[in-house]
Image (spheres, helix red, strand yellow):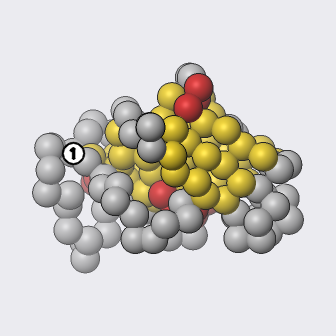
Amino acid sequence: MRYRSGGCSCGAVRYKVAGEPLRAGICHCTSCRKESGSVFTAFAVWPESAFETSGETRQWERRHFCPKCGSRLFEIDGGEAEIKIGTLDTAPTDLSPHYELWAHRREPWLKPIERPAAAPDGK
């Protein structure tokens, strides 16, 4: 089985996920833009049972971050762990987003993902 690891900028929080993600995407919603400081957030989702973490995190609205360096790392919700792709140790990663959320908020200079049609907003 394949394992991927990642963590925060200062190294106080680490995580590991087992197997392949259920899905990977990007989100252009206002919430993701503000919490990431970027125009979208890239993420991959695994079953919560495939996710392990060490180190102390703080949480705001299901979003876990490192209290020392502030790195935004993951969300746990509905039995799934949503990992921010940029927090993985390996870059570039072999993960590729397959769909977009809130695509109507995509910046005009960003091209759409050329994969299956964009997912409906909020799903």
* Residue 37 in the image, given as x and y percentages of width and height: 57, 70
Query: Residue 56 vs residue 48: left or right?
Result: right
Q: Which of 118 and 92 is in front in this view?
A: 92
* Residue 35 in the image, given as x and y percentages of width and height: 61, 59
**What is the number of callouts on the image?**
1
* Residue 39 in the image, given as x and y percentages of width and height: 44, 68
Q: Which of 49 and 64 is in front in this view?
A: 49
Looking at the image, can residue 78 be seen?
yes
Residue drawn at x 45%, y 71% is 91
Considering the image in quadrants, where does the C terminus appear? top left
Query: In this rendering, is residue 29 above or below 48?
Result: below
Query: In this rendering, is residue 23 above or below 25?
Result: above
Query: In this rendering, is residue 45 above or below 92?
Result: above
Q: Which of 78 and 104 is in front in this view?
A: 78
* Residue 33 in the image, given as x and y percentages of width and height: 51, 61
Query: Residue 18 vs residue 63: left or right?
Result: left
Element under disc 1? loop
Identified by mark 1, the residue type is Ala
Neighbour tally class for label 1: few under 14, some 14-19, many 20 plus, Cα within 10 Å: some
Q: Quadrant of residue 108?
A: bottom left
Looking at the image, can residue 31 be seen?
no
Q: Quadrant of residue 69?
A: bottom right
Query: Residue 105 vs residue 70: left or right?
Result: left
Residue drawn at x 70%, y 70% is 9
Considering the image in quadrants, where does the N terminus appear? top left
Residue drawn at x 49%, y 66% is 90
Name, please, the residue furthest toward the bottom: 109
Q: Quadrant of residue 107?
A: bottom left
Q: Which of 79 and 118 is in front in this view?
A: 79
Please give the residue where the numbered disc 1 appears in the rendered image: 118
Residue drawn at x 60%, y 36% is 51
